[in-house]
Image: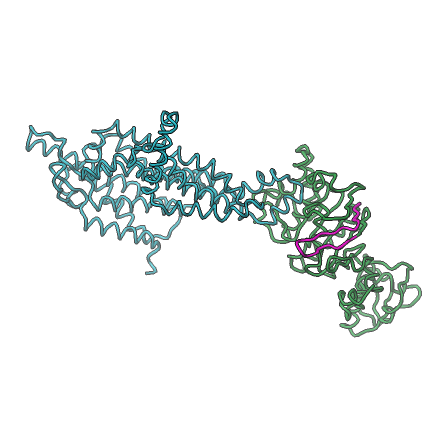
Amino acid sequence: MIELQEVSKRFGAVTAIDEVSLTIGRGELVVILGSSGSGKSTLLRMMNRLVEHDSGRILFAGEEIRSFRPEDLRRRMGYAIQSIGLFPHWSVERNIATVPSLLRWPKTRVDARVAELMTLLQLEPAVYRARYPHQLSGGQQQRVGVARALAADPEVLLMDEPFGALDPVTRAALQRELAHIHDVSGKTIVLVTHDIDEALGLATRIVLLDAGRIVQSGTPLEMLAQPASDFVTDFFGRADVGIRLLGLRRVSEYMRPVGEHPLHDDDEGPISDTLSLRDALSVFVSRRVDRLPVANGEGTIVGRLELRDLLRPPRPSEPGIAQ
Amino acid sequence: MAWVKNRVLLVLVGAGAAAAAGLPFLTHAPNRLVLGTGISLAATIASSAEAARAWALATIAAPALLLAASVFVRPGRAAHLGVIVCATVLLTGFVSLAGIHAAQLASIANELAPGANPDIARTSFGGSFWIVAVLSWLTASDAIARLGLKPVSRLLATAAVVAPVLICLAAGWLDQLSLLKEYAHRADAFSTALRQHAEIVVASVVPSLVIGVPLGIASTRDSRWMNAMRTPLFAGLNVVQTIPSIALFALLLAPLALLAARVPMLGRLGIKGVGLAPAVIALTLYALLPIVRSTAAGIRQVPRPVVDAATGMGMSPRQVFWKVEAPLAFPVFAAGLRVATVQTIGMAVVAALIGAGGLGAIVFQGLLGGALDLVLLGVLPVVAMALVVDAVLATLASSIGVR
């Protein structure tokens, strides 16, 4: 979908991006991860030509991005940023309809699309349609920001620390919704963040950036289990790697099914099979037990998890990723 | 002091009462040259004919007492409306009483000396008239502001407060006041001056908009040329602002006279050292600073992320400007336009000194002739013009502008 070939960018004497090559496939959710000043925002902003690259080539849908008019290119890519940048003088409805209006969609189509997106992002259209940004909470504003980025059904969604300014609860809710949107739409998403847990939780692939170079690129599991260098290990927090690995795995992949091991009478309430092992570990410790019954979504007991199971490789051959 | 519910009103009513008690309401002189004797408000009412006294009690004493009582009423919609009505009636009462009393004095003078020209007796507003009239106006404006009306309703409410005064004026009730006598003598010259004044203002503000707005916008754009020019541009405009207007008129005199002499074509178009041309050029230069500065400030206060999002979503630079920057910059720009216009209306008075005409001509005629009423005849319309233009621009700005 997007291909960068030995792309560099200098600001005066500073090299912001140094010969970066990266291919982002259709339907991927690529998280560009890095600390402040690593060049991650610059890398993203080069993709929609908000920053022009100095050398190398950037391809979008197989064509050099400079062959597009910048406006046309940007209208095919959704864009959401940390400070949201909603238009304060426009209603929620008009904000979301920005790109469809630029593309001159007919009014009925725009209205239907706005209602659809507001519902997808849990904003009741009847209530919020006519409101202005200053009448919304921070979380609602960012929902509008994401809806606006998705409005014209762009082929790619570019997000620059979209949830950085939100409180942890709202952030988690919006991360879940983004994962859901990615699941149902299969859209290609490129997201920039410095939040390690956000990257591990959302990404199908993480690109770790430092001083304008890619240090390592891979699935969240690969980044934790096979770090390419000490820098990667340090970045993900040497001491926390184990905990973070557990956070990527689900109880359902590690539990022993009911048939194999009978339940004990003294077991307390079951845990959900969709929990991550990280959360399960917390339950083990707080209840001071070494085994827990596991229930599925309907509440039926489907298996049992023992403390030592956390150290085994997962039951199904493929390691899964908790969403 | 807990029983005082409206402190602003308390101050206004107190100041009004003190002024009414201490300063003359009218001054009367047998002719234009001698100094008049003051007549207090109480004396004015006491010496009025019976019908006029009843009218004064109804339109002055009653609303004044009601206003005093309103100080102790908890402010609310009904209270504000009551205050507006009382203040309006009071303002009308003061103006009409002055007019009626002037007429009475004129007829007495006529009886005493039947052959004499009644036109030369002068009854003018005294100090307390101005104070209580302005305080009534402030009281009404304050209450209107507290009502929290929409911009247009607010303008209409303000107009309703002055309407009765204009009706008194149109009905001829005030004709025996010296101000109106001065007007009667030179009605033609007055309307010419008023028209000229408006023309000078329009001819100065429009070019300063045409030059200033693009300049202001350009100053916010990032280019090598503009980055170098920005500081000298604003420094230059600031320097212009510090030159006294008379000095600037004088500075323009020589070059324009020279230009007109060299290029006779320009002279025939009216461009010469004195008259309209130097006045309009100077006033345009003065108006330029507030307009350039407010345009630039308006655009600069548009949040960076909003422009970034607009660009990132595929708006062309032109669309970013018209859809995002211009509407968001408008309220700040409109404030600058108000300042520029009001400032120009006032400064245009001085332009009369270099023969540009306008209401300033009447003011200076009055100053040189020692006729205070004539000065007032020139100044009052300037003040009124400034207030009206300011109110209309404010209303336009807030109804077009965004929250």
State how the image is colored.
by chain
Quadrant hosting residue A253: bottom right
Quarter holding the N terminus of chain B is bottom left
Q: Furthest-right residue in view?
A: A260
- Rendering coords of residue A172 (x, y %): 71, 58
Q: Is residue A145 above or below residue A105?
A: below
Does the magenta stretch mainly form a helix, a strand or a loop?
A: strand
At 81% from the left edge and 68% from the top edge, which residue is drawn? A242
Residue bounds of the magenta highlight: A1-20
Q: Is residue B269 visible?
A: yes
Q: Is residue B8 above or below residue B111?
A: below
Taking the magenta stretch, the answer to whether it contains residue B121 is no
Of residues B92 and A40, which is closer to you in this image? A40
Quadrant hosting residue B386: top left
- Rendering coords of residue B201 (x, y %): 37, 35
Q: Colour of chain B?
A: cyan
